[in-house]
Amino acid sequence: MSMKQSIKIGGATGFWGETDLAMAQFLSEGDLDYIVFDYLAEITMSILARARSNDQSLGYATDFVSAMVQPNLQAIASSGVKLISNAGGVNPEACAQAIRDCVAQAGLDLKVAVITGDDLLPRVEELSAGGAREMFSSEPMPAVKKIASVNAYIGAFPVAEALTHGADIVITGRCVDSAVTLGACIHAFGWTSNELDRLAAGSLVGHLIECGPQVTGGNFTDWEAVAESLFEVGYPIAEVSIDGTAIITKPENTGGVVNRGTVGEQLLYEIDDPVHYVLPDVICDFSCVQLQQIGENQVHVTGAKGRGVPADYKVSMTWADGWRAGTILWYLGRKAAEKGRLFADEVRKRAEHKLAAMGVSGFDDVTIEIVGDESHWGESARYVRSREVAVKIGCRHQDKRAVALLLREVAGAGLGAPPGLAFFAGTRAKPSPVIRLFSMRIPKSSVPLTLIDARGSNQLTQMPEAPELTTVAESLEIPTAPDHDTLVQGELVTVPLERLAWGRSGDKGDKANIGVMARDKAYLPWIADALTAEYVAARFSHFMTSPAIHRFYLPGLPGFNFVLHNALGGGGVASLRNDPQAKSFAQILLDAPISIPQNLLDS
């Protein structure tokens, strides 16, 4: 049988709960080889763990079965397309069984395979006794009784093996987001564990399509260009060649757009160090990736490099750290912000006074945010005296009753408050668990993985590690703008960064990531001179609890990735922020003033 020279992969989901638009688009397209689904984030794992603790038949992304697979089984079977999904969450065997039941009820012959072994919760006592430390902060492991989930981030080779043994639908637990795509590539092209550049290229393709329409116009800086068609946005299709190069596109007659900006933004999304992006199968170098527009809604992607294979898996634990709650109300009229802040302070003082009277410790944290007030954005604010603001009040405490007390005071203080208070009528907010993330490393050799399919249960072979390369062939020297006295292009003008660049931001735990890609490489020196690490740190100083920030350069795009440490108040559901996942950070930075020659801008 001859080896395929190219395959087509559709990216159907980027999180648990996403709309089901993709399946109709992909099945209508008719010529896809694989459809991949990513459902898992750290918060999702904790939610699924709680579901499993209440019902042993749950703990997986149920809408993968009910919304994606079951309604489309006949079309899936007739098309021959294969599905790969990490919808298994903390209970992949239950997810696989639910799909097998659907297949049997439909009278079809689709083979379902499941990969297990990533769930390390049964070994939590062993990990604790081994003195596990957090991989970023070196903090000790939390108390065992507080831990909700423990999962290793597994890679692509088990997925490839399942496909090799004839699986039509592959279900995993905490498989890395991009690895569901890389697994299809390994299987289709016969890539081996030492073909590092190809593994990095397949991982990049997976990274580009793992968030669905974020690469086809969703969350795009130039949103006005696609505003009219986002209601029917197309989901991404990657046409991958055997050498790892790929074309990113979307189905015909769908909304959105695929261009260098949309693809570049997604490339920069949540990657941390682009020269050393560690995945279980390969350490990737995306710094010199090239994007070329080769047609309408077609971007050619080349240049990913592999720098080694790690010996360890990353392991993420989620653990309970008390309770939290937050609520939003509105203040209107003259001095709306001042009235809102006075009301919030009144609520906080009343709750704290009652806790003290009961002999209970104070809140772990209370956050008050006046959205619409100029002070909310720190140094990036413009003076605006709004007559309508949103008032966000949030708190954390180890005792659920203390959190509920503050919520009662929010409602109870309404009659003794400044005028102009407005609520949205309905159910009041309730306390919810604070879930924190603890990340660590564990040797791959200590995490046996198992493939369960029609042949039974078979242990999988671990791929060998490869030493990390120590040099980068391409120069990463950042270009600088010429001294103003030597300029021949003309006078400098100041424009917002958005006129010169695209941007996108996201999170990794308590770290914020902001990617910036120049619209033209000639703009990059001027962007580089303005967006120093020090400038970006100052821009977001009102968010950060420490000034730690790194600026990484990607000459291929060209662009930068900024990583802001300790910037999200704990991140995820541990944070009381309005934006605990830094989704708005790029929008703040795109307003930064950049000086550039008028002639260069005109050209």
Image: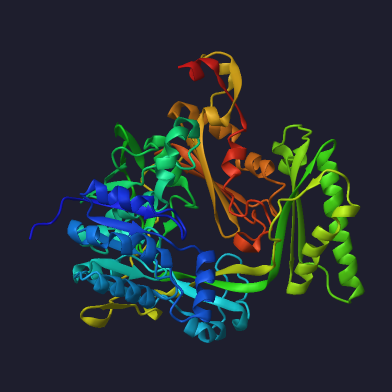
Instruction: Report if residue 190 is visible in the image.
Output: no
In this rendering, would 4 be left or right of 218? left
**At x 42% / y 76%, what residue is drawn?**
91
Quadrant containing the C terminus in the rendered view: top left
581 horizontally vs 81: left or right = right
Q: Is residue 172 above or below residue 600?
A: below
The residue shown at (58%, 39%) is 587
> In which quadrant will I find the N terminus?
bottom left
Q: Image quarter for residue 429? A: bottom right
Q: Is residue 57 above or below residue 594?
A: below
Which residue is drawn at the image coordinates 79% and 33% (left, top)?
385
Left or right side of 491 for 445: left
In the displayed structure, 72 sits above or below 51; it is above
Count up the numbered dots.
Answer: 0
Q: Position of residue 393 (x, y in %)?
A: 75, 55
* Residue sticking out furthest to the left: 1
327 w.r.t. 519: above or below? below
